[in-house]
Amino acid sequence: MPTYPTFEYGKPRFDQNTFFGRFRHFLDVIDPRTLFVTEERLRESVDLLESFKHGRLPPGVTSAQLWQAHKIKQAIIHPDTGDKIPMPFRMSGTVVGLLLPNQTLFSTVFWQWLNQSHNACVNYSNRNASKPTDMSKFFQGYMGAVTSAVSIAVALRVAIQKADRFSPTTRRMVQRFIPFPAVASANVCNVVLMRHSELSEGINVLDDKGNVVGTSKMAAKRALFETALTRVVLPMPILLLPPIVMAMLESRLPVLRSRPGLLLPVHSLVCLAAFSLALPLAISLFPQMSQTVQRQVVKEQVGVRQYRDGSLRSR
């Protein structure tokens, strides 16, 4: 049975100063079971947390029940807007068609487009909404990501097909790794295009009570760098492990060669396992709320006193 600490409103269940604590935290955020929470259960969870916040908690409610309510809310409700995030665009969604074997040129373009469309919607739905986001920037990032992903994937596919030194078997194996450089570069392009204005405008900096005390361009630069790096690490296990695992399974399990119909369900399970590992691993690399470096903030317009012990919400 899991153990639950005493519930504290507005604070995470796990220590966010350690990688393992953040990893456990995001395992809750991406729990696929939260995709099927009913409206009634969501409303009950939100009401329970509001009752705790205002000191009107019903008797007999345990910390375990409060943490479960908190888990449901953080997985479904946007922390800045308070709006419900649409099911397909929550952190527990993904597109696995990129890794299907024996893809044609058309299927390569289609799955890259679909993946980046999904990524753009996920980025927007889970964005830092402490400041208004111009929809033109959203479309700019989307178009840049789709263009870069499709261009790189098609270029690599054509280059591999024209490589005479590759045997047919080697060529098929190498083609399975094409999605990674395409997706990684597109993810970075998406982040930079959608959030580049933060570099000139800065992002909100908070005190230890969550109050906005000013904006910081240096904090924005750090947040953008960490987010972009996360988007590069994220597809690594998803796009690199399944091709390796599937190649091993196909060579060692004759049933997969004799019954091609089994490839898709087995492949989907492998991708699901890789995704379950990759997402919490990537987004746990950096704290969501990062402490600012005081001597850097001194150089900006807001005084050191306002920024002391401040933090930023980067992603």
Image (cartoon, grey):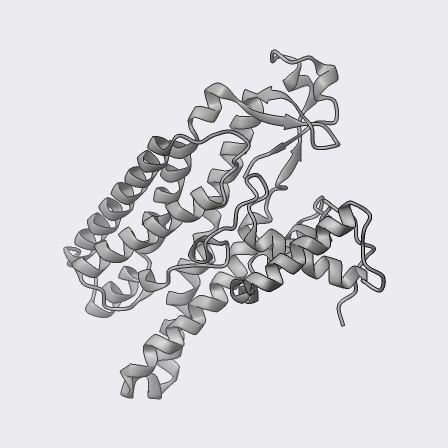
- The quarter of the displayed image where residue 34 is located: bottom right
Where in the figure is residue 56, as x and y percent of width and height?
Answer: 81, 51
Instruction: Name the residue at 44% across, 71% down.
Output: 270
Instruction: Name the residue at 48% across, 61% down.
Output: 275
User: Which residue is the extreme one toward the right?
Assistant: 59
Residue 165 visible in this rendered orientation of the protein: no
Q: In the image, 66: left or right of 244?
A: right
Q: Is residue 161 above or below residue 233?
A: below
Q: Is residue 149 above or below residue 202?
A: below
Q: In the image, 1: left or right of 140?
A: right
Q: In the image, 37: left or right of 115?
A: right
The front one of 4 and 150 is 4
The front one of 31 and 180 is 31
Where in the figure is residue 2, as x and y percent of width and height?
Answer: 75, 68
Q: Is residue 303 above or below residue 291?
A: above
Position of the N terminus, as image quadrant, is bottom right
Instruction: Name the residue at 55% across, 45% down.
Output: 78
Where in the figure is residue 314, as x and y percent of width and height?
Answer: 56, 35
Residue 49 visible in this rendered orientation of the protein: yes
Position of the C terminus, as image quadrant, is top right
